[in-house]
Image (cartoon, grey):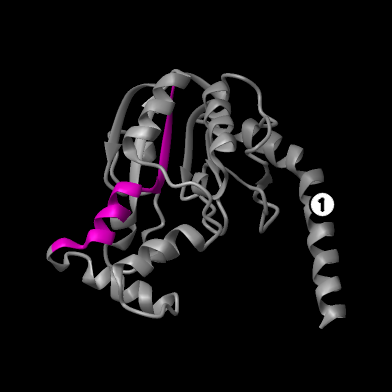
Amino acid sequence: MKIKSNIKKLYTFMWSLFSKLYTPIVIQNYLSNNKILKLHIGSGKNVKDGWLNCDIEPLSTKVAYINVTKKFPLKDNTFDYVYSEHMIEHINHKDGLLMLNECFRILKPNGIIRITTPDIDNLIDIFHNDQNKYDDYINWSYEVNDLVNKSSIEVFNNFFQSWGHKFIYSKSFMKNHLENIGFKNLNFFNICQSGNDELKNLENIDRLPNNFLQIESFSIEGRK
């Protein structure tokens, strides 16, 4: 077991080193071959055509290595769009602010950001579960997370402790941050909906059943 663990650690280290080396090439190729420039932060397996996909753990040579808790390796006023889905909640609040400021820096004037992230107000609503509104979601969470009981309080606590979550935002808290950074024309949208064609149908709705991604999330857009 120890040998396998050491081999896995060595592989992870070598892949991380390799991804950092090829990232400048991935970025330059993207910038040279696209007129509308779109940055997808925290792509994971959800690699999108026409976007510069990036992640702290790239899973392929199509994805650039970018650590969003540090200055992005990208020039000011470069991108038309920035999109991130269910990523910012995996870093702490201070690093989240840095990420949002970096998004503002690398966007062109009038460029648009779209952030989709868990909504703490919805989670509180799930916790109260008035009129058994969220029974289906609670039952599903109980089954997939191997919880002790089908109780809203356990689902609520599990959400904060699982999947590497570090900070859950409310709509108003996120909006205030974006406004303070300098974003304007801030609006909320349902999952996969937008006032801009480039930002429609981006969320990976297939990773959760029914309408559960919408239950968990809010999407906000703003213009630089």
- Asked whether 127 falls inside the magenta stretch, the response is yes
Which quadrant would residue 70 be assigned to in this image? top right
- Placement of 146 over or under 172, stated as above or below: below
Q: Is residue 193 above or below residue 13?
A: above
Determine whether the residue tagged by mark 1 lies in a helix, strand or loop.
Answer: helix
**Image position of 54 (left or right of 110):** right
Residue under label 1 = 18
Where residue 23 appears, x then y in whole percent?
74, 42
Q: Horizontal placement of 33 versus 174: left or right?
A: right
Q: Is residue 192 visible?
A: no
Q: Tag 1: Cα neighbours inside 10 Å, few (<14), some, or many (≥20)?
A: few
Q: Nearer the viewer, residue 118 or 206?
A: 118
* Residue under the image location 39 percent in, 51 percent down: 203
Name the quarter where the C terminus is drawn: top left
80 in relation to 171, above or below: above
Residue at image coords 52%, 54%: 165
The amino acid type, in three-letter code, at marker 1 is: Phe
Please indicate whether residue 42 sits to the left or right of residue 157 in the image: right
Residue 55 spot, x, y in % from top left: 63, 48
Q: Position of residue 175 (x, y in %)?
A: 36, 30
Does residue 205 appear in this view? yes
Give the image quarter of residue 4.
bottom right
Camera-side residue of 218 and 141: 141
Q: Residue furthest left?
A: 131
- Which residue range is magenta in the image? 110-130
Residue 21, image x, y percentages: 82, 44
Q: Quadrant of the N terminus?
A: bottom right
Is 153 part of what is drawn in magenta?
no
